[in-house]
Image: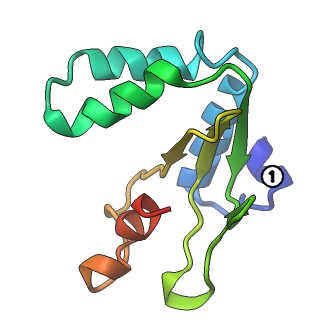
Amino acid sequence: MIEEIYKKIKHFEEDELTGDFFGTIKYIPFQEGFGRILNEFLKVKEDQKFKKAKEILETFGTNVEFIFWNKQNGKRKYTKGEDATEPDVLIVDENENAILIEVKYMSGPSDGDTEEKKQINREKNF
């Protein structure tokens, strides 16, 4: 539904999945909804690379905004052209902690012919 508002529905299954799931879960208080899902996922991850994610999630605030398919947020701006990126969902709390969601469904991990041009690498530096 939300994907229709953002004019993202053109037989893009990823956008439909994103809109249906995150468009619904955003109405549940973060710590009881998506925050709880992330906590359960991170509980089983002993890997060092998840340490920072666990720390951020522990301090994530309760006043949360879900931003869909936006190329800019506050002071942060994306560039146009090859370096442009459009994360599916950006979840930001009142302390400016952020969780960036990139949904992949029946597609490769990201585009780009070099590592720095790959979508996931452009977005992780957001």
Colour convention? rainbow
51 versus 19 height, above or below: above
Amino acid carrying label 1: it is Glu
Q: Quadrant of residue 77?
A: bottom right
Residue extending furthest toward the top: 32
Which residue is rendered at x = 70% and y = 16% of the image? 28
Q: Residues within 10 Å of mark 1 (few under 14, many from 20)?
A: few
Which residue is rendered at x = 36% and y = 81% of the image? 117
Which residue is rendered at x = 74% and y = 50% of the image? 3
Q: Quadrant of residue 24?
A: top right
Percent from the top left, x then y, of residue 93?
66, 33
Percent from the top left, x then y, of residue 67?
71, 47
Say whether residue 98 is left or right of residue 73.
left
- Residue at the disc numbered 1: 4
Which quarter of the rendering shows the N terminus? top right
Which residue is rendered at x = 61% and y = 82% of the image? 79
79 versus 11 height, above or below: below
Q: Nearer the viewer, residue 50 or 96?
A: 96
